[in-house]
Image (spheres, rainbow, N blue to C red):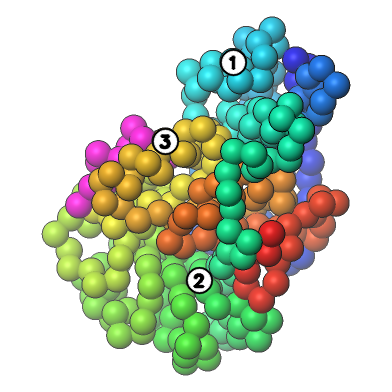
Amino acid sequence: MRIEAHHHSIQLTKPFTISRGTRTHCDVVRVTIEYQDFLSQGECTPYPRYGESVDSVIAQINNFSKALATLDPLEARIALQSFPAGAARNALDCALWSMESRLYASAFPSPYFSIQPVIETAMTVSVADTATMTEQAKQYVDQGATLLKVKLDAESVIDKVHAIRQAVPETKIIIDANEAWHTLDLVSIFEQLTPLNIAMIEQPVPSGQDHLLKGIEHPIPLCADESCHTRAELDTLIDCYEMINIKLDKTGGLTEALALEARAREEGLAIMCGCMLGTSLAMKAALPIATNAEIVDLDGPVLLGSDIEDGLTYLNGTLVL
């Protein structure tokens, strides 16, 4: 196999803000695999929160590739699982899944997975002042969105959610704190949010401080994101969360994501399928997880100024396949 990795920088339609900062561009790394007469690709998004950069991920991919080059695609994907999870392994793993499909004269996710033809996906409201966030939420709903993911930091939490709920009284809302609420009174926050009909709260405390959630009454289900990468973390999350967010850039690819999904189900945890900012190439690789997930958040391409040529179709808050 011939394996190459290249950096692509894509401008966002508008700045995207979460509790950790603001981004104006999405930097992805794409892997291209050539095997026999076939080409396949995979995409990952290096994430500084996890100590990744474009340069470090490309270096990892080049290093992994040396051990995989003499193997066939299936052998390579199996061997790849011994390398560290993260964005680099994800791009390779997804490219290898795609190559296997091509060898069967098919296109991923066929012939391995049956995907629902229509999947509801969250539309993301990024952190801003209350008026701006409320207006963005209304715009998404006016465009057909039925599920909103509201990004929040530790400022004016209740005021922002209350204003958004008043503006879109019938829309399903989930909240993503991105680890920012550790300085807040969680008991009070959860109590005040409960009447606002919130479907789920994602990662209220920093990874490693999940024990702070044990024993706290929370009628709204909690979801682990930054705290859950692979099956290795699951045991520490039981009794802290009711759901986990599976992202391929965290699991190191679809292979581990499928194993994580199965183990989480055994433990009674619900599944959210999420994403980093990225193109439809990355979202397509996550569809086998999304098709069975209770909550799906694969709106990454909607936030970009451009997508791949054969991108996914987003219509009225859904992925139409």
Q: Residue at x 42, y 86 (%)?
A: 162
Q: Nearer the viewer, residue 321 or 228?
A: 321
Res 101 quadrant in image: top right
Magenta span of residues: 229-239
Q: CA distance from mark 3 to mark 1?
A: 18 Å
Q: Residue at x 36, y 84 (%)?
A: 196
Q: Residue at x 35, y 56 (%)?
A: 270
Residue 186 coordinates in the image, percent (x, y): 25, 67
Is residue 48 shown left or right of residue 176? right
Q: Earlier in the sequence, mark 3 or mark 2?
A: 2
Residue type highlighted by circle 3: Ala
| Residue 293 appears anywhere in the view | yes
Is residue 106 shown left or right of residue 146? right
Residue type highlighted by circle 1: Glu
**Quarter placement of the N terminus:** top right
Q: Compared to 309, does 8 lie above or below?
A: above
Residue 19 coordinates in the image, percent (x, y): 50, 60
Q: Residue at x 63, y 69 (%)?
A: 318
Q: CA distance from mark 1 to mark 2?
A: 41 Å
The residue carrying mark 2 is 150
The residue carrying mark 1 is 75
The 10 Å Cα crowd at callout 2, few under 14, some 14 to 19, many 20 or more, is many
**Secondary structure at numbered mark 1:** helix
Q: Residue furthest top?
A: 70
Q: CA distance from mark 3 to mark 2?
A: 29 Å
The residue carrying mark 3 is 259
